[in-house]
Image (spheres, grey):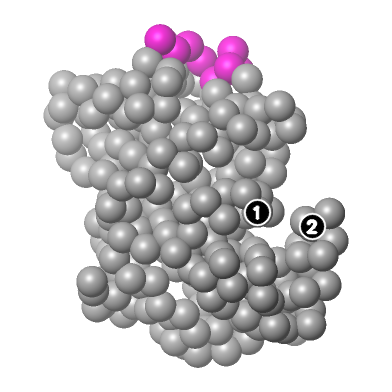
């Protein structure tokens, strides 16, 4: 399998704050990478650098063999990446169907008929086809996040980035979103997911990465991570979160 995402010596500063420190990472085509770590460790900044929502201060992000730059990042990310955020980021003045067809029509120049067909198929996959004509405010948090996942599917990009997609949900809504994510992980999508859901990491990850203080301190298979972690900071984190 080819390398779909390569991150080389990535640094990111916000003013004097050094958020990412020489981060290097490779995600192969179809691989499921789960990024874990305490709040403020740089996880979300890392994933946002992958699709240039944050511009790296130095280092490289390479998507399917092509380095992201100021000139080409918009074209590359529209071709390869879709993203699901912590907050659902749905347009409140548009129906569910309108939210799903907007990008394919406006950015990918799909016909309304084709975009609608794809949107309905995506809603079917997340179990919400019956909500196509509803507005986001009429949906539960779990339903809104499932719509956000369906929206990401509509663009049919080979890379899906998920930034703590369950963190804004009430506990009883988390599982319905995780079920959709587990189902998606069975497909040949390259997935990078920042999450605190250790059960999800155990179930779907090909590789788990632990970050703290802007650095990758440990990486390995889920079996290695949850049974034989080596880094002291990683051990401490897992001992607290797995109680």
Q: Quadrant of residue 108?
A: top left
The residue shown at (39%, 33%) is 150
92 or 203: nearer the viewer? 203
Q: Is residue 84 above or below residue 24?
A: above
**Distance of label 1 from label 2 (alpha carbons):** 8 Å
- Residue 184 is situated, as x and y percent measured from the top left of the image, at 39, 42
- Residue 153 is situated, as x and y percent measured from the top left of the image, at 34, 39
**Label 1 vs 2, first from the N-terminus:** 1
**Is label 2 in a helix, a strand or a loop?**
helix
Q: Is residue 62 above or below residue 204?
A: below
**Residue 218 shows in the view:** yes
**Is label 1 in a helix, a strand or a loop?**
helix
The residue shown at (33%, 71%) is 28
The residue labelled by disc 1 is 198
Q: Quadrant location of the C terminus?
A: bottom right
The residue shown at (79%, 79%) is 233
Left or right, residue 74 beside residue 213 = left
Left or right, residue 179 beside residue 69 = right
**Residue 112 shows in the view:** no
The residue labelled by disc 2 is 241
- Residue 122 is situated, as x and y percent measured from the top left of the image, at 32, 29
- Residue 65 is situated, as x and y percent measured from the top left of the image, at 24, 78
Q: Which residues fall within the magenta stretch?
A: 130-139
Q: Quadrant of residue 209?
A: bottom right
Left or right, residue 34 beside residue 183 = right
Q: Quadrant of residue 100?
A: top left
Question: Is residue 221 rendered magenta in the image?
Answer: no
Question: Is residue 134 rendered magenta in the image?
Answer: yes
Cβ atoms at labels 1 and 2 below 8 Å apart: yes
157 or 209: nearer the viewer? 209
Q: Is residue 199 above or below residue 112?
A: below
Left or right, residue 60 beside residue 54 = left
């Amino acid at each position: 399998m080819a390398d779909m995402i390569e991150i080389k010596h990535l640094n990111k500063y916000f003013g004097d704050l050094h958020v990412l420190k020489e981060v290097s990472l490779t995600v192969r085509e179809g691989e499921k990478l789960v990024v874990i770590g305490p709040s403020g460790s740089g996880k979300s900044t890392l994933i946002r650098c992958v699709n240039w929502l944050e511009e790296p201060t130095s280092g490289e992000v390479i998507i399917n063999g092509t380095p992201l730059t100021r000139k080409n990042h918009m074209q590359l990310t529209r071709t390869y990446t879709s993203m699901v955020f912590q907050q659902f980021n749905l347009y409140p003045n548009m129906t569910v169907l309108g939210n799903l067809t907007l990008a394919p029509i406006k950015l990918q120049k799909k016909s309304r008929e084709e975009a609608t067909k794809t949107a309905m198929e995506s809603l079917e996959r997340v179990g919400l086809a019956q909500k196509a004509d509803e507005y986001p405010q009429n949906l539960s948090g779990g339903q809104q996040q499932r719509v956000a996942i369906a929206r990401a599917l509509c663009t049919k990009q080979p890379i899906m980035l998920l930034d703590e997609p369950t963190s804004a949900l009430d506990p009883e809504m988390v599982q319905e979103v995780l079920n959709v994510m587990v189902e998606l992980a069975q497909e040949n999508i390259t997935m990078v997911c920042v999450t605190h859901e250790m059960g999800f990491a155990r179930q779907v990850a090909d590789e788990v990465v632990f970050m703290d203080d802007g650095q990758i301190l440990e990486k390995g298979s889920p079996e290695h991570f949850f049974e034989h972690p080596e880094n002291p900071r990683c051990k401490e984190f897992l001992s607290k979160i797995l109680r």
